[in-house]
Amino acid sequence: MPLNKPIRLVPVILAAGGSRRFNGVKLMSRLNNGKLLLEHSIQQLQLGCEQFQAQQDGVHSNASVNHSVDISRLELSPVTVILGGHHECLAPLLPSGMAYRLNPDWHQGLSSSIRVAVKHAAELDADALLLTLADQVALESHDYAALFALFCGRFSQGAPHSGQTTAAFYRQTPGVPAIFLADDFSALSQLNADKGAKAILVERHNRQQLQLLPLEQAAIDIDTQTELSLWLADA
């Protein structure tokens, strides 16, 4: 990416699963903060976008900033949600005016939702795509803001890897949430069945083409009623 060229990033929450192991509509589970799981996940990502943009505006308004550092603006598109299973009851939970894309092939697994997300990003002529899961209940707004900052090298003077694919790192391996470059879109579109993007991230990591943000809380997702109960008890 050329220096100082704005980078258009599309943030997407994958929320199309059928909650087969949960025995219910997982994303309608109520958390300790009173919000439903889907509402909570959307709010945290939206707040993360707002926090990063506030930090970004502060950098641009500060005349003392060293402009030898790449401070190209990261243009964040509105958050989009991919729905599929249970979309009839989940769509009404979305904030007013929020865009969502329907994955009619959601039963084919996570890869089908990733393809919908990639198509959406490509239609917006995006330079990058953030993918995160709606059931990663422990993620908070500052986690997303930190991921955005690492991606564009905002706080690393002379960062050599600004503009690389960027991912969370937990359980000794990269995973989502992750920011993929447009160069990754073809590989993402070729994923099959219930395979997520981890294989692509591991490949990039092995080739030293991946930035990592330690984020152990990203390992916590909700698949069963028992996992939800344990999370609510500890939160």
Image (spheres, rainbow, N blue to C red):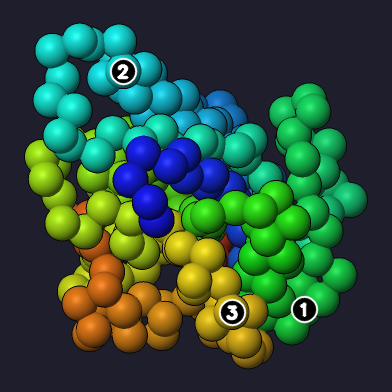
At x 66%, y 53%, the residue is 125
Instruction: Give the vertical position of 6 relative to 125 (above or below).
Output: above
Q: Which residue is mark 3?
A: 186
SS label for mark 2: helix
Front one among 106 and 54: 54
Q: Which mark is residue 107?
A: 1
Around disc 2, counting alpha carbons within 10 Å, would you say few (fewer than 14), some (14 to 19), or many (20 or more)? some
- How far apart are the two marked residues, 3 and 2, measured between alpha carbons? 34 Å
Displayed quadrant of residue 43 = top right
Q: Position of residue 216 (x, y in %)?
A: 24, 57
Q: Residue at x 24, y 39 (%)?
A: 70
Tell me, yes or no, if residue 199 can be seen here: yes
Q: Which residue is mark 2?
A: 60
Q: Secondary structure at mark 1?
A: helix
Quick check: 188 left or right of 227? right
In the picture, residue 176 is in which quadrant? bottom left
Q: Residues within 10 Å of mark 3 (few under 14, many from 20)?
A: few
CA–CA distance in space, label 2 to label 1: 45 Å
Give the residue type that dot 3 points to.
Ser
